[in-house]
Image (tube, grey):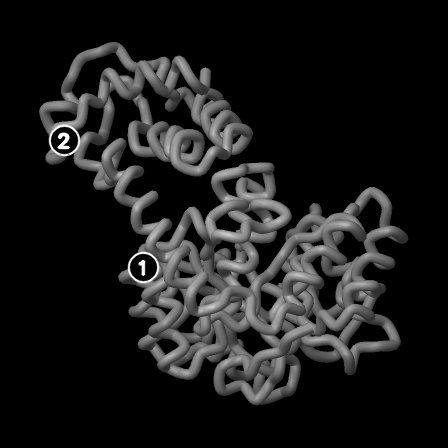
Amino acid sequence: MQYREFGKTGVKVSRLGFGAMRLPAKEPDKAVELLREGINLGINYIDTALYYLDGQSEVLVGKAIKGQRDKVILSTKNPIEDASGANWRKRLEKSLAKLDTDYIDFYHMWAINWDKYVNLIDVANGPLEEARKAKEEGLIRHISFSFHDSPENLIKIIDTGNFETMLVQYNLLDRRNEEGIAYAKSKGLGVAVMGPVGGGRLGAPSKEIASLIPQGTKSSAEMALRFVFANPHVDIALSGMSDMVMLKENVRIASLEEPLSEEEKKILEDILEEKKRLAELYCTGCGYCMPCPNGVDIPANFTNMNYLKIYGLKEAAKNGYNKLKEENKAAENCIKCYECEAKCPQKIEIVKQLEETVKHLA
């Protein structure tokens, strides 16, 4: 296992973190065994959250680390449900009880955005004040945040100077936070990444993904992990592992001293830029075409087509399309009013491409 200094926290963390969101919760003994084997294989960072697995994730993690708390760096998350520091404290105490521990190493303001930060977190008698008190009491050791917002707002939150580490989305398919990750590292924050395999999308077999570097990889999942590990500004990649095969394969990849050589990085970067260019021929994702009068989420439909056409991720594309269909946002709802085409700055034949989306994904 490879290890990294986690920002300026003074903590050394394993490159691979165990995300406890996909544990086999219906088989608790198996879940505990899996976590313990991860620790035996060198993983020292376990990430969970108050409500993962219907509230059972923290309990399972607590059982797994019993008797070896000193070997584990524990991360969990507090949902910002209101502006009350007292309520935030109750949720912290609940997590401590479920984890059966006296302290949490990295405690996250969960899934925050700039609006939440301004109106619910950094307020009088709010969560940030309470977090500082909890840190002084030794209940938490580092104040962190996980993030779901625009790249511009990520920079704003980093610049508050109130956080020591962050957890953000980053993978081959979603590189929006790449600049923010580098910026965080320059400011001394530890950087953990969620979704390195694209929430499972990159775990599906894809010749296009697996062959992104000349000598290829065993799987598209391996390529996805090696891509994230090769970013010098990323300290930890969290993977939600549900069985021993997945665990051991991910540990193998995380143990590579050089996930990608400099030559491979250059080749990969050139290929990804070309794929981005090809994707933007289909849709740049600017959103000027929206809203659709009949509720079609045009950019989301085209994102799924790019998964299919550019990356060969057929299963992910179809799953994404089916979700849009459930939400009545799928391409087949297009009524050919052409309002979108009049607004598109790229002059894309949107209606024709929506028909193509239906043909391939419906």
Measured from the top left, where is residue 48 in percent x and y?
Answer: 66, 60
Q: Which mark sits nearer the N-terminus, 2 or 1?
A: 1
Residue located 48% across and 52% down the image: 214
Q: Which mark is residue 344?
A: 2
Residue in the image at 29% along x and 14% along y = 334
Q: Secondary structure at mark 1?
A: helix
User: Disc 2 residue type?
Assistant: Cys
Nearest the eye: 339 or 50: 339
- Say few, some or many: other residues with alpha carbon within 10 Å of mark 1 (under 14 / 14 to 19 / 20 or more): some
The residue to which callout 1 is attached is 151
On the question of residue 90 being in view, the answer is no
Q: Nearer the viewer, mark 2 or mark 1?
A: 2
Relative placement, left or right, of 109 versus 47 is left
The quadrant in which residue 94 appears is bottom right
| Residue 96 picture quarter | bottom right
Quadrant including the C terminus: top left
Measure the alpha-carbon separation of dots 2 and 1. Answer: 23 Å
Which amino acid does the dot numbered 1 rest on?
Answer: Pro
Q: Position of residue 78 (x, y in %)?
A: 57, 63
Residue 316 x, y percent position in the rendering: 52, 33
What residue is at 74 percent from the left and 75 percent from the top?
72
Where 44 falls versus 357 (above or below)?
Answer: below
10 Å neighbourhood of mark 2: few (<14), some, or many (≥20)?
some
